[in-house]
Image (tube, rainbow, N blue to C red):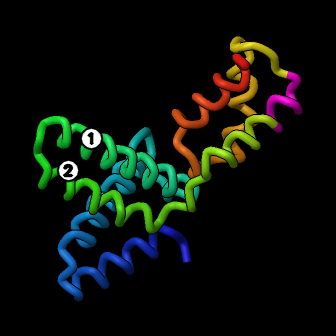
Amino acid sequence: MPLKAKLRDDMTTALKAKDELRLATLRMVLTAITNEEVAGKSSRELSDDEVLKVLTREAKKRREAAEAFDQADRRELAERERAEGGVLEEYLPAQLADEEIAVIVREAIASTGADGPQAMGQVMKVVQPQIAGRAEGGRVAAEVKKQLAG
């Protein structure tokens, strides 16, 4: 079953179960997917990979909003954002651990023969397809920088 269809089915289930948090979160993400589909010159159906990118982006927004609410001492809003993020995480692939990212980066550096910080883009091109959706870009970039500098 395509991911978008699963999201719709789960939204219907949440509606019937009166699960307000899950319902609101899934509505929000389906709206984001629809907006992505109609953006540009012509509308199109997103692939599962593209839907995953939208989910990842929305989950990141929830994490950042929770941090901002924490800094503003708005605990109840931060908790809501974290709860929505938790719902979204259920649909994302398992995140890679730092050690797993380090191994992938090490292999990419070895295969490209990259040396020094100026080769970061070259290494990222090799690493990105391997970690797509399974690690945040910032974490990966930090590991690449660390290994290229060391």
Q: In terms of depth relative to the viewer, which is nearer, 90 or 42?
A: 90
The residue indicated by pointer 1 is 67
Q: Which residue is mark 2?
A: 78
In the image: residue 108, left or right of residue 18: right
| Residue 145 place in picture, x, y as percent | 64, 23
Say which element carries label 1: helix
Residue occupying the point 11% across, 45% down? 74
From the viewer's perspective, is 6 left or right of 66? right
Residue 123 place in picture, x, y as percent: 74, 28
Task: Give the image quarter of residue 83.
Answer: bottom left
Packing grade of label 2 (10 A; few <14, some 14-19, many >=20) is many
The location of residue 4, given as percent across then percent down, is 45, 67
Mark 1 and mark 2 in contact (Cβ < 8 Å)? yes
Mark linked to residue 138: none
Residue at 68% of width from left, 22% of height from top? Answer: 121
The residue carrying pointer 1 sits among few (fewer than 14), some (14 to 19) or many (20 or more) residues within 10 Å by Cα, namely: some
Sequence-first tag of 2 and 1 = 1
- CA gap between label 2 and label 1 equals 7 Å
Q: Position of residue 59 (x, y in %)?
A: 38, 51
In the image, residue 95 lies in the stretch drawn in magenta = no
Magenta residues span: 107-113
Name the amino acid type tagged 1: Glu
- Examine the rendered structure and indicate whether residue 82 appears above or below residue 104: below
Towards the viewer: 88 or 95: 95
Instruction: Please tell me whether the stretch drawn in magenta is mainly helix, strand or loop.
Output: helix
Q: Amino acid at mark 2?
A: Ala
Q: Which quadrant of the view contains residue 60?
A: top left
Quadrant occupied by the C terminus: top right
